[in-house]
Image (spheres, coloured by chain):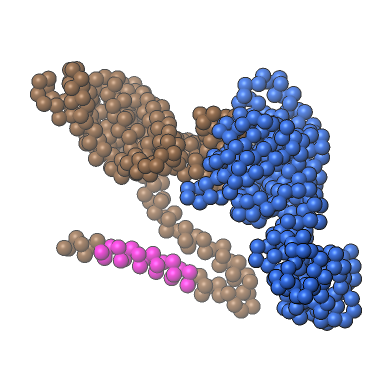
Chain colours: A blue, B brown
C-alpha cells in the first residue's frame, strides 16, 4: 500500500493551470523530497496533499483512502511550515498539544504525548516558554514536535530549513533524517536546496512548471538523468553543457578538439545535441586552449571556471590549487563514457 | 471677504512663522556653537543637546498654555464658590457626593462605559472578520465606517428623528415608531422611557464607534500570519475555534487599544446626550452635567468639581491606552 498516491492530479488558479496531471506513488515509510526551482509547483502540490489547496482534478490517496475532498484535519497529515507558524500566544507545550486538544483528547493523554515528543526533540527545558523566547532552530523543533504529537500518517515539510542559518540547517537536516528513522513515518519534504534533497531523500521528485521531470533515488537521478533539466538541477556545481553535432558517426563539438564516438543509436547523423559533463568528470591536463577565468579554492577541492574556445563556460572540479584570479590556459580531458548526450531542442536524454 | 483674507493671512503667518522659528532658531544655534574650529566636536555635542528643545519648545509651550494651565485652574476653581469670590475648600466635592443627579450621572457613565466599548469592539471585530470574507466586503466596510464621518451632534439629530414620536393615529415620521405601528404596536416616546432611554442613546455612539473599531481590527486581523491559521486548520480547529483561539489572542493588544480608546470617548460623551435628551428623564452623564452647572447655572465651582472628577476617571484609562499602544508599536 502506498503512503501517498497521486493520480492525474491537476490544479488551476482561475484560468491558469499550475499542476499538470501529476502521477506519483510515495511508499509507506518513505522519505520523499519534492525539489525544483521556485514557481515549479512543489509547494502547491504539498499544500494539495495537506488539503490547504483544493484539488481541481484527479485523486489523492493517503494509505489507500481517497482524501481528495476531505478536510485537512481528517487526512491524517501534519505539516511543518517554513515560517514555523507557531501560535505566538501559547507556550511550547500548548503549541504542541493544540491539535490533540482540538480533537478532544483527554488532558493526561495530551500531556503524555507532548512529554514524549519533547523528549525525542530535547525540548523539555523549553516547554513553558513562548515562541518569542526561542531561537530559530528551537522554533522549528517545536514545529516538528507539534507534528509528531499528532501521530500523523504523513509528515509534510514545506521548506522547513530555509529560514535557518547554514550551520543550523546542517544540524536540523541530520535531526529530521534521524526522526524519520525513529518514527518510520511517510514524509514528504519540499525544498529548493538540492543538497537537502540529495542527502535526505529515499526518493526525489524533480518538478518543473507543474510537471514531474523525473522520479528516482538520489544517485539514480545523478547517474542517470532523463533529461537536461534534471541533469542540470541535480549536482553541485551543475553539470556542464556544450553544443555539439553528430557528423560521420562522431559527436563533434566546437569546444573540444577531440571528437566522441556516437555511442548511442539515437545519435543520428546531423543531429544537434548537447554534451553534458559533470565537473568531477573533467580533468585538467597541462597547457591547452581553455582559459582560466576564475578559480574557487575550497582547500580540499578547487572549482576552476574555464572558457572554451567556442565561448562556452565549463566548471572543473580538481584537487589542484589555482590562482583565484585566474589567468593562463589549460587543457581538458575526460573519459567519453562519462559524457551524457541530450537533444538540443527537447532536452531529452539520448541514451 | 474680510474674514477670508483674515483666514488666509492667519494661515500664511502660522506656516511661515513655524518655518521661521525652526529655521531661525537652528541658525542661531549653529552660530553660537559652530561645527568647525578647534572646539568643533564639543560644539556639535552641545548643539545636539539643545536642538531637540528647539523643536519641542513650541509644543510644550502651547500644551502648557492650553492643557496644563486649565487643569490647574479648574482644580483651583473647584475649591471656590460659584463666582470664584470665596474659597470654600472641599465643599463642592461634599455637595457632589450627596447630589442625586451627580450619582445618576455616575451610574449612567458607568453603564456607558461597560456597554459602548464592549459592543463597539465586538461588532467591529465581527464586521472586520466577516467583511474580509465577502466579495462586496469593501463596500460593506465603507458603509460601516461612514458614521465615523458624522459629527456626534449630527448623529444625535439623525437618531432623534429615528426615535421621533407622533401621537397614535397620526402618520409616524420616526423610523422606529413607524416599524412598531406597522407591526401593530403602539408608538412609544422612546427617549423618555426610564432605564431604556440611556441605551437608546448608547446605540448612537455604538453606531459611530463600530466603524472605528472595525478599521483598526481589520488591519490587525490581516497582519496575522496566514501560516498560523493554516496550522490551526491542520490541527483540526473549526472556523470558530480558529477565530477565538488563534486570531483573537494574536490581536489582543490591538483589541485593548481599541477598547480603551472608545472608553475615553465614552467618558467624555456630551454631544449626543446634549442634543437628544439634554440629560432629562434619567439620562444625565458627567460631561453634560458639568456643562449644565458651568454654563447654565453659571456655577464655576461645582462645574469645575465635576470636570475634575471626570478627568480623574479618564486619566488611568488614558495611561493604560498609551501603554498598550506603545507596546503595539514595538
Q: Which image quarter: residue B161?
A: top left
Q: Relative to residue B299, is residue A93 drawn left or right?
A: right
Residues shaded magenta: B8-27
Residue drawn at point x = 32 percent, y = 23 percent: B104
Q: Relative to residue B120, is residue A202 drawn left or right?
A: right
Give residue B144's position: percent from left, percent from top. Answer: 34, 39
Magenta segment, principal secondary structure?
helix
- In this view, B9 is above or below B191: below
Residue drawn at point x = 17 percent, y = 63 percent: B2
Give residue B74's position: percent from left, percent from top. Answer: 35, 40
Q: Is residue B14 magenta?
A: yes
Give residue B157's position: percent from left, percent from top. Answer: 22, 36
**The C terminus of chain A lies in which quarter of the figure?**
bottom right
Residue drawn at point x = 74 percent, y = 54 percent: A194
Q: Does the magenta stretch include residue A117?
A: no
Residue drawn at point x = 35 percent, y = 33 percent: B206
Q: Nearer the viewer, residue A148 or A257?
A: A257
- In this view, B74 is above or below A231: above
Q: Which residue lies furthest to the top in this view?
A: B185
Q: Nearer the viewer, residue B49 or B245?
A: B245
Q: Which image quarter: residue B111?
A: top left
Amino acid at each position: 500500500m502506498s503512503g501517498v498516491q497521486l493520480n492525474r492530479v491537476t490544479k488551476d488558479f482561475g484560468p491558469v493551470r499550475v499542476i499538470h496531471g501529476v502521477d506519483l506513488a510515495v511508499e509507506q515509510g518513505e522519505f520523499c523530497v519534492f525539489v525544483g526551482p521556485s514557481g515549479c509547483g512543489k509547494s502547491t502540490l504539498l499544500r494539495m496533499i495537506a488539503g490547504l489547496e483544493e484539488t481541481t482534478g484527479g485523486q489523492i490517496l493517503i494509505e489507500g483512502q481517497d482524501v481528495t475532498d476531505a478536510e485537512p484535519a481528517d487526512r491524517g497529515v501534519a505539516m511543518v511550515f517554513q515560517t514555523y507558524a507557531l501560535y505566538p500566544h501559547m507556550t511550547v507545550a500548548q503549541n504542541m498539544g493544540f491539535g490533540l486538544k482540538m480533537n478532544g483528547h483527554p488532558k493526561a493523554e495530551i500531556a503524555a504525548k507532548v512529554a514524549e515528543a519533547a523528549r525525542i526533540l530535547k525540548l523539555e527545558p523549553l516547554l513553558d516558554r513562548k515562541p518569542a523566547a526561542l531561537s530559530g532552530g528551537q522554533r522549528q523543533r517545536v514545529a516538528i514536535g507539534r507534528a509528531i504529537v499528532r501521530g500523523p500518517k504523513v509528515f509534510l515539510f514545506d521548506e522547513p530549513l530555509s529560514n535557518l542559518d547554514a550551520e543550523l540547517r546542517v544540524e536540523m537536516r541530520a535531526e529530521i533524517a534521524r526522526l524519520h528513522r525513529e518514527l518510520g513515518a511517510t514524509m514528504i519534504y519540499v525544498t529548493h536546496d538540492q543538497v537537502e534533497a540529495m542527502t535526505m531523500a529515499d526518493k526525489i521528485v524533480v518538478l518543473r512548471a507543474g510537471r514531474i521531470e523525473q522520479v528516482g533515488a538520489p544517485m539514480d537521478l545523478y547517474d542517470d538523468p532523463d533529461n537536461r533539466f534534471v541533469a542540470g538541477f541535480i549536482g553541485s556545481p551543475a553539470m556542464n553543457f556544450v553544443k555539439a553535432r553528430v557528423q560521420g558517426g562522431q559527436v563533434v563539438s566546437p569546444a573540444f578538439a577531440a571528437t566522441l564516438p556516437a555511442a548511442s543509436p539515437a545519435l543520428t547523423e546531423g543531429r544537434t545535441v548537447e554534451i553534458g559533463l559533470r565537473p568531477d568528470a573533467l580533468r585538467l591536463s597541462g597547457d591547452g586552449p581553455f582559459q582560466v577565468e576564475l578559480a574557487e579554492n575550497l582547500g580540499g577541492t578547487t572549482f576552476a571556471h574555464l572558457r572554451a574556445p567556442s565561448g562556452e563556460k565549463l566548471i572543473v572540479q580538481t584537487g589542484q590549487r589555482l590562482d583565484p584570479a585566474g589567468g593562463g590556459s589549460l587543457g581538458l580531458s575526460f573519459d567519453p563514457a562519462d559524457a551524457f548526450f541530450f537533444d538540443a531542442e527537447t532536452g531529452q536524454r539520448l541514451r | 471677504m474680510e474674514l477670508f483674507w483674515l483666514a488666509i493671512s492667519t494661515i500664511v503667518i502660522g506656516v511661515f512663522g513655524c518655518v521661521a522659528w525652526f529655521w531661525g532658531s537652528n541658525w542661531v544655534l549653529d552660530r553660537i556653537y559652530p561645527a568647525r574650529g578647534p572646539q568643533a566636536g564639543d560644539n556639535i555635542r552641545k548643539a545636539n543637546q539643545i536642538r531637540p528643545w528647539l523643536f519641542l519648545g513650541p509644543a510644550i509651550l502651547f500644551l502648557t498654555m492650553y492643557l496644563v494651565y486649565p487643569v490647574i485652574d479648574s482644580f483651583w476653581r473647584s475649591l471656590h464658590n460659584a463666582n470664584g469670590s470665596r474659597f470654600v475648600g472641599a465643599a463642592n466635592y461634599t455637595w457632589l457626593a450627596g447630589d442625586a443627579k451627580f450619582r445618576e450621572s455616575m451610574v449612567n457613565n458607568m453603564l456607558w462605559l461597560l456597554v459602548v466599548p464592549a459592543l463597539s469592539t465586538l461588532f467591529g471585530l465581527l464586521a472586520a472578520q466577516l467583511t474580509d470574507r465577502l466579495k462586496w466586503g469593501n463596500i460593506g466596510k465603507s458603509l460601516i465606517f461612514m458614521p465615523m464621518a458624522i459629527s456626534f451632534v449630527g448623529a444625535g439629530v439623525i437618531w432623534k428623528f429615528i426615535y421621533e414620536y407622533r401621537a397614535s393615529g397620526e402618520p409616524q415620521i420616526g423610523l422606529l415608531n413607524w416599524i412598531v405601528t406597522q407591526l401593530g404596536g403602539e408608538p412609544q416616546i422612546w427617549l423618555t422611557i426610564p432605564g431604556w432611554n440611556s441605551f437608546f442613546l448608547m446605540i448612537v455612539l455604538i453606531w459611530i464607534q463600530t466603524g472605528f473599531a472595525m478599521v483598526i481590527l481589520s488591519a490587525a486581523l490581516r497582519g496575522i500570519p496566514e501560516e498560523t491559521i493554516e496550522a490551526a486548520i491542520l490541527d483540526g480547529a473549526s472556523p470558530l475555534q480558529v477565530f477565538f483561539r488563534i486570531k483573537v489572542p494574536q490581536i489582543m493588544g490591538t483589541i485593548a487599544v481599541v477598547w480603551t480608546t472608545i472608553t475615553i470617548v465614552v467618558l467624555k460623551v456630551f454631544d449626543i446626550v446634549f442634543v437628544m435628551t439634554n440629560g432629562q428623564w434619567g439620562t444625565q452623564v458627567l460631561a453634560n452635567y458639568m456643562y449644565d452647572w458651568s454654563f447654565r447655572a453659571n456655577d464655576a465651582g461645582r462645574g469645575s468639581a465635576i470636570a475634575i472628577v471626570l478627568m480623574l476617571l479618564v486619566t488611568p484609562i488614558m495611561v493604560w491606552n498609551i501603554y498598550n499602544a506603545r507596546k503595539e508599536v514595538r
